[in-house]
Structures are given as structure tokens and as C-alpha cells.
Image (spheres, rainbow, N blue to C red):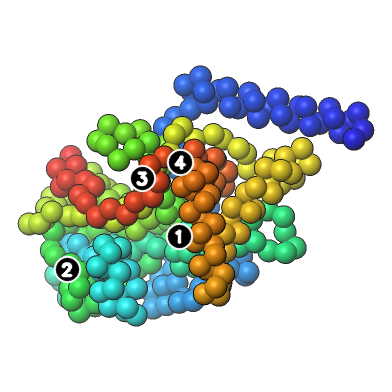
């Protein structure tokens, strides 16, 4: 290694040490704020969805306007993930999808609004390892979809279709503009919520950014606009938790995968995600599950990609958990 290369390596390691010290000194905000962008970039053509995103609706989350004098009913919608294909199978595991329905009194038109992954959940949770690229490649965009109609059977047969309030036409139009702005700046899906432990006083390291979070943001916006929303039943939501000690910041793609000094770290991250690669055979999948157990439970290690940056999680018992519980009370949506 030349003197220049040694100098670059030392400077890089010192900069990472400084970042780590800044976070260790208490200046790191927990949970890490979700990063927003000036505009949504086009999806990479490499990314493919098994089921097309928003096939019958507006892929940019745009709404038809209604008259300010209209009265629009608001519905809470919930159904098992992939209910259209597997029925209530995932519902028995409490893996649910959330959305919002609307109905115009003046026109009689019904609408459904939901926010979900452009390329399915697996692609948003784990990356692809492309032979021509050293850095993992992510297809993790999520977006709002707005389409005409409410499929009553789809939502009510194995889930929930419940009217939770009414808004004026002007409130609906203001919400519609907010959804477009939110959709343009919040561009990627995040599966995991990362906490220090399952207890009520746990520290939240990272928040998920998924369909239920979009529903909550919309409820809060409607409440800010003066809407009164309530439900006759407890409103539970699916959360997928990771449990860890305080996370360590590692860097972004260029810092990790573009620097020879961090080749070992880059290789470790690639090897970790190789365990969770898509399109595995049954034999490979069984072996990968054993590898995942070793990595997460025995070695207590997990690499998280958040805000297009990598973090290391020192995993703790119970490691991973899927819950279906009341995340927010209706009083939280009252202003």
C-alpha cells in the first residue's frame, strides 16, 4: 500500500470515528428521523414487481376534487396481506394491510387510498446482490395509490370495513393536496421498527414507514383540518420489530463499498444479505434460514439499511417479533 493510500485510509477511519463519537456523545436523535426528498426519482428498470403497483389507479396518488359543500364519509379498511391470493392465511398470523376509503354524498362515488411497496415487501426488506455491482441494490420505493371504488368483499370478509367519520369537501381537497406532497417527498418503504426491548419504556431506534404509518399520518392530517374520527372497536396494526442495543452508524454506499479500507465491512454486509436473497430453491432456503438464525440469534448481528445508510444492530432477545396491537388511540387523532 502506498503512502497516499495509507493517508486516505487513515482519514476515512478517523472520519468514521468522529461520526461514531458524535452519536455516542448523545447528539444522535432517536428514533432516527425518516429522510425526505425534494422529489420522487423514477424507479430503476431492474426492479420488477410480481404484481404491478396500482394497476387501476393513479400511481402518483392524485385525487379528483370534490365540491367544497360535499360531505365525504371516511372508512377504515384492513385486510390480510395478499388476501386476494391466499385468503385469510396471513391474517391468522396477524400480518395485515391498512388503507382508507372515501364516499362522496353528492356524487355517490367511492374511492380507496393506500400506500404500499412498488415491488413487493421482500424487495423493500432485503436487497438484490447483482454480480456487476459490489454494493447491494435496493428496490425499496413505496408510494400512495388512489383508485375509484371500494371492494367491500375484499375488505370485510377477512378484515375491517368501518365508517369512522365524515369530512367536508374542502377538508377532503386539502387532504388530497397533502397526500400528493407527502407522496412526493416520502419515497421509500421501511419494514422494520427497531427497539431496545419489548417493554413500554423501550427506546425506539428506528420507526417503520409502511401502510399503517401512512394511514396514521392521514388520520392526523384530517384531524388537523378539523375532522372528528372515531371507531367502535380497538384498532390494531401489524408491526415487525427488531430488538437491539444501541445501533452503530456505518456509512452510505459510497463510503462503505467505494473505499478499499472498508472492504472487510463491505464483504460482511454482502454476506449477510446473501442469506436473504430472493428466488432461492427450497434447499437453499432451508440452509439460508439456518444461516439467518446463526447471524441474528447466535452472533447477535443485523445490518439495517435506513435513509440509504447502513447501521449495525447488536441484536438482543427476543430478536424479532411480529405484533398485532393498538399502536395509537383515536384520542391521538384529536386536535
Residue identifier under label 2: 161
Query: Between disc 2 and disc 1, whose residue precedes?
Result: 1
Q: Residue furthest top?
A: 25
Q: Position of residue 231 (x, y in %)?
A: 11, 55
The residue shown at (15%, 47%) is 330
Residue 113 appears in which quarter of the rendering?
A: bottom left
Local SS, label 4: strand
Q: Residues within 10 Å of mark 3 (few under 14, many from 20)?
A: few
From the viewer's perspective, is the residue at label 4 or at label 1 nearer? Answer: 4
- The image's mark for residue 60 is none
Neighbor class of circle 1 (other Cα within 10 Å; few <14, some 14-19, many 20+) is: many
| Residue 12, picture quadrant | top right
Left or right: 225 as drawn, with respect to 12: left
Which label sits in the foreground, 3 or 2? Answer: 3
Crowd rating for badge 2 (residues with CA inside 10 Å; few <14, some 14–19, many 20+): many
- Front-most of residues 243 and 47: 243
* Marked residue nearer the N-terminal end (2 or 4): 2
Measuring 54% from the left and 65% from the top, which residue is drawn there?
A: 287
Q: Is residue 160 above or below residue 242?
A: below
Query: In percent of the image, x 49 and y 61: which residue is there?
Result: 289
Mark closer to the chain start, 4 or 1: 1
| Residue position for label 3 | 318
Task: Give the residue pinned by disc 1.
Answer: 142
Determine which residue is flagged by label 4: 315
Amino acid at each position: 500500500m502506498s503512502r497516499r493510500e495509507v493517508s486516505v485510509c487513515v482519514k476515512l477511519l478517523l472520519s468514521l470515528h468522529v461520526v461514531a463519537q458524535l452519536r455516542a456523545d448523545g447528539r444522535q436523535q432517536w428514533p432516527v428521523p425518516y429522510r425526505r426528498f425534494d422529489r420522487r426519482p423514477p424507479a430503476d428498470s431492474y426492479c420488477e414487481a410480481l404484481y404491478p403497483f396500482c394497476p387501476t389507479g393513479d400511481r402518483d396518488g392524485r385525487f379528483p376534487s370534490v365540491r367544497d359543500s360535499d360531505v365525504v364519509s371516511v372508512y377504515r379498511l384492513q385486510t390480510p396481506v395478499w388476501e386476494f391470493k391466499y385468503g385469510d392465511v396471513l391474517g391468522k398470523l396477524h400480518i395485515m394491510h391498512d388503507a382508507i376509503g372515501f364516499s362522496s354524498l353528492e356524487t355517490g362515488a367511492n374511492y380507496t387510498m393506500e400506500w404500499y411497496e412498488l415491488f413487493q415487501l421482500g424487495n423493500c426488506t432485503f436487497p438484490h446482490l447483482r454480480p456487476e455491482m459490489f454494493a447491494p441494490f435496493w428496490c425499496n420505493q413505496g408510494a400512495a395509490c388512489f383508485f375509484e371504488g371500494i371492494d367491500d368483499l375484499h375488505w370485510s370478509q377477512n378484515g375491517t370495513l368501518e365508517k369512522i367519520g365524515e369530512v367536508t369537501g374542502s377538508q377532503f381537497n386539502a387532504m388530497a393536496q397533502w397526500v400528493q406532497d407527502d407522496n412526493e417527498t416520502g419515497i421509500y418503504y421501511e419494514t422494520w421498527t427497531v427497539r431496545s426491548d419489548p417493554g413500554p419504556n423501550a427506546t425506539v431506534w428506528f420507526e417503520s414507514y409502511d401502510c399503517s404509518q401512512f394511514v396514521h399520518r392521514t388520520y392526523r392530517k384530517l384531524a388537523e383540518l378539523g375532522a372528528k374520527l372515531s371507531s367502535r372497536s380497538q384498532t390494531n396494526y401489524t408491526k415487525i420489530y427488531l430488538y437491539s442495543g444501541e445501533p452503530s452508524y456505518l456509512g452510505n454506499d459510497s463510503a462503505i463499498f467505494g473505499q478499499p479500507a472498508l472492504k472487510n465491512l463491505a464483504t460482511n454486509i454482502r454476506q449477510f444479505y446473501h442469506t436473504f436473497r430472493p428466488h432461492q430453491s427450497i434447499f437453499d432456503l432451508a440452509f439460508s434460514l439456518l444461516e439467518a438464525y446463526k447471524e441474528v440469534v447466535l452472533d447477535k448481528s443485523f445490518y439495517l439499511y435506513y435513509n440509504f445508510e447502513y447501521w449495525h444492530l447488536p441484536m438482543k432477545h427476543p430478536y424479532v417479533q411480529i405484533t398485532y396491537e393498538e399502536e395509537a388511540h383515536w384520542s391521538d387523532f384529536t386536535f
